[in-house]
Amino acid sequence: KVTSSDRILQFASINFDVAVEEIYCSLCTGATLVFRTDKMIANSRTFLQICEDWQITVLDLPTAYWHGGIGSARGHADYERAHQGPFLKAFPDRIGGNHKCRIGDGSYVASTGWPSLNATHLGDEWLGIPATGKRITQRIMDFWRREGDLLAENWVFIDMIDLIGQLGTDLLPDYKREIS
């Protein structure tokens, strides 16, 4: 619930309909509307630092902002650049392969098993999160679609809320307060 003590980041372009939600939400609740700058969106580390410095409490970010990270790769080369390379550097001692559940139906197959991966967070390049030295586990589920003998698509669901929490950041503190 947004209150008058919140600081809402006006992220969307004023020409985009999502901006209406950000603006009216602050007007209706008495919250402070804070306008983003171009410098703010240079990279995720800068963005998060400025949000913290400006004490932003409400963000509504478009999927397009996260292009270049997990889930937004277009083709294998982009996947290697945007996710795989930084991930491998951040978790160099990873051990995986605990996918003990495999499900298939027609041209679709899924695989999972928890923990799917055990590792230590030793590198700074993944998602702009500084190395923590913490041991983590990952909960992952992979889905693939085949066309003939070739894999046509792959979707990987990673429990990012749990993973980021293991690295020391609670992504849902307000929801936990509401539940308890």
Image: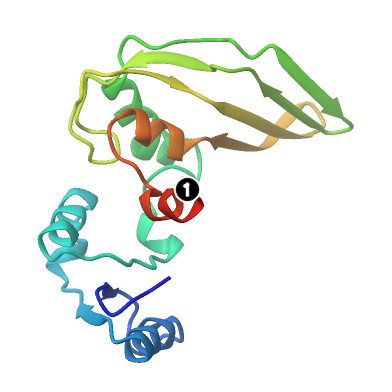
In the rendered image, the quadrant that contains the N terminus is bottom left
Q: Is residue 63 left or right of residue 99?
A: left
Q: Residue at x 38, y 90 (%)?
A: 28
Image quarter of residue 67: bottom left
Crowd tier of the residue under label 1, counting other residues whose Cα lies within 10 Å: few below 14, some 14–19, many 20 or above:
few
Percent coordinates x, y for residue 141 in the rendering: 62, 29
Residue 43 vertical placement versus 127 (above, below) = below
Q: Is residue 125 left or right of residue 148?
A: left
Q: Position of residue 121 (x, y in %)?
A: 27, 21
Q: Amino acid at mark 1?
A: Ser
How are the colours assigned in the image?
Answer: rainbow
In screen coordinates, is 9 left or right of 106? left
Give the residue displayed 59% in from the left and 10% down from the top. 98
Identify which residue is drawn at 22% across, 81% down: 32
The x, y position of residue 9, in whole percent, is: 27, 73
* Vertical side of 117 occupied by 151: above or below: below
Would you identify the image quadrant in which residue 113 lies?
A: top right
In percent of width and height, residue 87 lies at: 34, 27
Question: How many numbered badges does the structure rendering display?
Answer: 1
Most extreme residue toward the right is 106
Q: Is residue 80 above or below residue 113?
A: below
Q: Which residue position holds label 1? A: 180
The residue at 36%/49% (across/down) is 173
Task: Looking at the picture, tell me which residue is in the foreground, 72 or 21.
Answer: 21
Residue 63: which quarter of the image?
bottom left
Relative height, residue 27 to residue 92 (above, below)? below
Q: Check disc 1 and report its element: helix, strand or loop.
A: loop
Nearest to the observer: residue 88 or residue 151: 88
